[in-house]
Image (spheres, grey):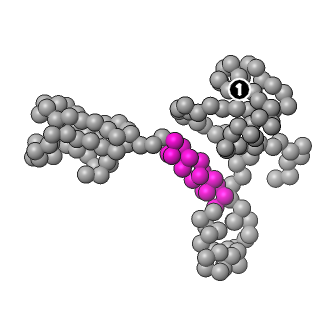
Amino acid sequence: MKSVEPITERIIETHRLRIIARAGVGYGNIDVRAATRRRIWVTIAPMNSIAVAKQTIALMLTLSRKILLLDRHVGRGSWYRSLSTPRELMGTELWGKILGIIGLGSMRILYYDIARRKDLEEELGIEFRSLEDILRETPCNLIILKPKHNHQ
């Protein structure tokens, strides 16, 4: 069964099950009490959280910059002529927005800034490094530049 389909007491009682295993996290769609009464093992196969986190970032950027819309127009050869204004292609600027991260897992965060923030290092568990060290040690970097003047 798909991981989102509910495994109800009726399903458990009408099938000869020995184990209920689902991909993902949590047991919210499984009647665990009914399974326990019938001595059926219930388990999960957790998804690769690293891949999920990467996909989340990719989707966030894809949606904010309207990459799918742009791809569709380029594929049709229409580019921006079919849109009412080229501004529709620009998407949403992520600058100045707040990003919430729930569950860093085992991610190690290195940072560089012109002003070292020892208070944040201790509070957030982040490590200060030179810019050169970060560029050498990390396979992926998020660079946040704050312009002197914001012309938006």
Badge 1 is on which residue? 127
Please rate how many residues cluster around mark 1, counting C-alpha atoms within 10 Å: few if below 14, some from 14 to 19, many from 20.
Answer: some
Q: Nearer the viewer, residue 107 or 132?
A: 132
The x and y percentages for residue 45 are 34, 40
The x and y percentages for residue 81 are 70, 78
Outermost residue toward the front?
136
Outermost residue toward the right?
148
The x and y percentages for residue 49 are 48, 40
> Which residue is painted at 27% across and 42% down in the image?
21
Residue 31 on the magenta span: no
Quadrant of the rendered structure where residue 12 is? top left
Q: In the shown orientation, is residue 39 left or right of residue 20? A: left
Q: Which residues are magenta?
A: 50-66
> Which residue is painted at 78% across and 23% down in the image?
117
Amino acid type at circle 1 is: Glu
Q: Nearer the viewer, residue 9 or 35?
A: 35
Mark 1, secondary structure of its residue: strand
Q: In the shown orientation, is residue 3 left or right of residue 112? A: left
The x and y percentages for residue 91 are 68, 59
Query: Can see residue 10?
Result: no
> Which residue is painted at 63% across and 53% down in the image?
61
Quadrant of the rendered structure where residue 97 is? top right
Query: Can see residue 7?
Result: yes
Residue 57 on the magenta span: yes
Quadrant of the rendered structure where residue 115 is? top right
Q: Nearer the viewer, residue 130 or 85?
A: 130
> Which residue is painted at 74% across and 65% down in the image?
87
Q: Is residue 129 above or below residue 90?
A: above
Q: Is residue 106 above or below residue 18?
A: above
Q: Main secondary structure of the magenta part?
A: helix
